[in-house]
Image (cartoon, rainbow, N blue to C red):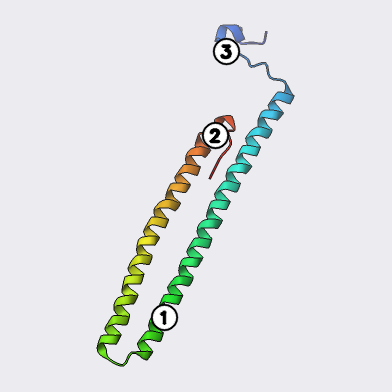
């Protein structure tokens, strides 16, 4: 028994784990694999979010282009007002979609974060 200042492991009440270096290496490999898997899940989630927001920016540009086209072809004040009203309606729909997407993306990150924190046993993750 190891002694330190006249005390041994039994007097301290410590249980020394009986791990061989191979077991420690295996535990380290599992932890590292779980970390890599979690990083991949985060990056995949970021990539899909980025793609969705790029598509959203494209739809905004298309909407603006449509508005300009309708305004240049408008021959009266009611036609101009109608073009603006239609554009505003579409923009409100896009804003509602943005809100849903933001909530969904936030929830995905929270779920991934919770899985990461609960990953003590190296469980598999699903994004």
| Image x and y of residue 57, in percent | 46, 69
Which residue is rendered at x = 38% and y = 56% of the image?
A: 100
**Residue lying furthest bottom:** 75
Q: Dot 3, crowdedness within 10 Å: few (<14), some or many (≥20)?
A: few
Tag 3 or tag 2, which sits nearer the N-term? 3
Which residue is rendered at x = 45% and y = 76% of the image?
A: 62
Q: Dot 2, crowdedness within 10 Å: few (<14), some or many (≥20)?
A: some
The CA span between labels 3 and 1 is: 74 Å
Residue 127 seen in the figure: yes
Which numbered disc covers residue 119? 2
Which residue is rendered at x = 53% and y = 54% of the image?
A: 46
In this rendering, which labeled residue sits more in front, label 3 or label 1?
1
Determine whether label 3 and label 1 are within 8 Å by CB: no
Does 93 appear above or below 37?
A: below
| Image x and y of residue 64, in percent | 41, 78
Which numbered disc covers residue 14? 3
In this rendering, which labeled residue sits more in front, label 2 or label 3?
2
Does 44 appear above or below 83?
A: above
Q: Dot 1, crowdedness within 10 Å: few (<14), some or many (≥20)?
A: few
Tag 2 or tag 1, which sits nearer the N-term? 1
- In the image, 25 versus 53, the foreground residue is 53
> Residue 1's quadrant in the figure?
top right
Tag 1 or tag 3, which sits nearer the N-term? 3
Residue 8 seen in the figure: no
Which numbered disc covers residue 66? 1
- In the image, 50 versus 62, the foreground residue is 62
| Image x and y of residue 50, in percent | 52, 60
């Amino acid at each position: 028994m190891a002694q330190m200042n006249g005390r041994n492991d039994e007097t301290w009440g410590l249980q020394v784990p009986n791990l061989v270096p191979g077991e420690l290496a295996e535990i380290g490999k599992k932890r590292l694999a779980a970390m890599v898997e979690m990083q991949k899940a985060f990056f995949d989630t970021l990539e899909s979010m980025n793609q969705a927001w790029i598509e959203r920016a494209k739809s905004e540009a298309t909407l603006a282009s449509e508005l300009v086209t309708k305004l240049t072809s408008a021959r009266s004040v009611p036609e101009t007002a109608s073009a603006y009203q239609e554009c505003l309606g579409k923009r409100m729909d896009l804003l509602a979609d943005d809100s849903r997407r933001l909530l969904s993306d936030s929830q995905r990150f929270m779920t991934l974060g919770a899985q990461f924190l609960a990953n003590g046993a190296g469980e598999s993750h699903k994004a």
